[in-house]
Amino acid sequence: MIATFEGFLAPALAHGRLEEALEDWSERFPGPFLYFAGRPHLPPPLRAFVDFLRSKAASAGTRA
């Protein structure tokens, strides 16, 4: 069994490259949540990571 975030699999499932097996036994998990201090001056590596996740969420049509 392979478990991963739904967003990563959605395109392959939509195009028929993958099929879900044992759907009734699969636990849904849309992905992790990122919590961070909303201060104006985040360290640059954290700012880059947050921006990356937000862009991925936007392209997947999910909320960031």
Image (spheres, grey):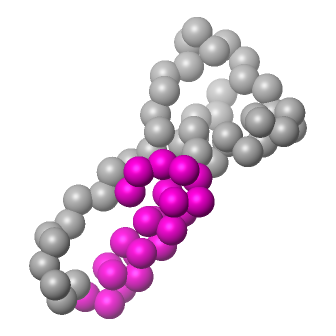
The residue depicted at 86 percent of the width and 33 percent of the height is: 16
The residue depicted at 64 percent of the width and 34 percent of the height is: 2
The residue depicted at 32 percent of the width and 79 percent of the height is: 46
Give left or right: position of 36 versus 28: left
Question: How many numbered marks does the figure carry?
Answer: 0
Q: Quadrant of the N terminus?
A: top right
- Where does residue 14 sit, x and y in percent of width and height? 77, 36
Query: In this picture, is 16 found above or below 50?
Result: above
Give left or right: position of 12 versus 39: right
Q: Pick whichever, 61 or 7, lies toward us.
A: 61
Q: Where is residue 19, by image quadrant?
A: top right
Query: In this picture, is 44 found above or below 28?
Result: below
Q: Pick whichever, 62 or 28, lies toward us.
A: 62
Q: Where is residue 22, by image quadrant?
A: top right
Q: Is residue 47 magenta?
A: yes
Query: In this picture, is 50 found above or below 41?
Result: above
Q: What main secondary structure does the magenta stretch of the protein show?
A: helix
Q: Quadrant of the C terminus?
A: bottom left
Residues drawn in magenta: 43-64
The residue depicted at 45 percent of the width and 65 percent of the height is: 53
- Where does residue 50 sit, x and y in percent of width and height? 37, 72
Furthest-top residue in this view: 24
Q: Is residue 18 magenta?
A: no
